[in-house]
Image (tube, grey):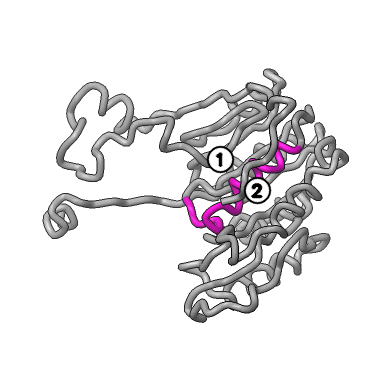
Amino acid sequence: ELLTKELRGKVKLEDAGFDWKILGPDVHDIDYVAWQCDQDAYAYSGQKCSAQSILFVHENWKKAGIVEKISEKACARNLEEMTLGPVITWTNDRIKSHIDALLAIPGAEVVCGGKPLEGHTIPSCYGAFEATAVFVPLAEMMKPENYKLATTELFGPFQVITEYNDSSLDQVLEACERMESHLTAAIVSQDINFQQKVLGNTVNGTTYAGVRARTTGAPQNHWFGPAGDPRSAGIHTPEAIKLVWSTHREIIYDCGRADASWTAPKAT
């Protein structure tokens, strides 16, 4: 109420989220999925509430080369083409400290990036870092002494990657349940039984399911209601109560296969 009065009703509050994506056991359209993973994790230098923070890779996708394809796209990002930019809330020292702490976990390694950008004039009070991914073994990540660190959101061009198989899916679901902020999520699979198992054991507010599943894009799929002013718009209407204030869950199925002629758009 105080902020509403002081700012004349123009109050915008946005929480972040350590958003996960699970690549299911069925491998389809690997180039499209690699592109979508790159966009979800690194577009806008990862500074968006729906950024892909952790990627659970089924061993079938790992064998197909998805990690290498994501790494190739991440390494192509740069300041000149504005596919990377300043990191507003994390300095380079803080980013490096977080990466070093993750690398102290047994079996962890840098997949791509891991270094500050060079040849720029970005002030040191901001971060300027390569698009980075760190692999952390699932069994190590789930240990109490490592879990909080591995699921700390770095609001920048960074993600954690881990691998699982059919027998460790329950560990993946446990990892998703233990996260504190359940904002957006993605289940990349055409297998309806796999989709339903994951959907039935997770609670994220906006979840995408299907081979084109992404973590980014929620605003185009549900109504935010008060349009920036909590004292106006749809407040008290049945629609607002159901679609906004009831904190409903939204599941978007995006199962259409990529066309054979599809090529990756330019990174953003």
* Residue, disc 2: 38
The residue type indicated by label 2 comes to: Asp
Q: Secondary structure at mark 2?
A: helix
Q: Quadrant of residue 224?
A: top left
Looking at this view, name the residue that lies furthest to the right. Answer: 63
- Comparing 261 with 15, the one in front is 261
Residue range (magenta): 31-48
Residue 192 location in percent, x, y? 68, 18
- Comparing 19 with 220, the one in front is 220
Q: Is residue 40 above or below residue 224?
A: below
Q: Is residue 146 above or below residue 161?
A: below
Name the residue located 53 percent from the left edge and 74 percent from the top edge. 91
Q: Secondary structure at mark 1?
A: loop
Name the residue located 54 percent from the left edge and 72 percent from the top edge. 127
Left or right: residue 150 versus residue 51 is: right
Residue 7 location in percent, x, y? 16, 57
Which of marks 1 and 2 precedes in the sequence?
2
Name the residue located 68 percent from the left edge and 23 percent from the top edge. 257
Decide whether residue 2 is among the magenta residues. no
Residue 11 location in percent, x, y? 23, 52
How far apart are the alpha carbons under marks 2 and 1? 11 Å
Left or right: residue 151 versus residue 231 is: right
Q: Nearer the viewer, mark 2 or mark 1?
A: 2
- Comparing 84 with 6, the one in front is 84
* Residue, disc 1: 215
Q: Quadrant of residue 113?
A: bottom right
Decide whether residue 35 is among the magenta residues. yes
Left or right: residue 66 versus residue 101 is: right
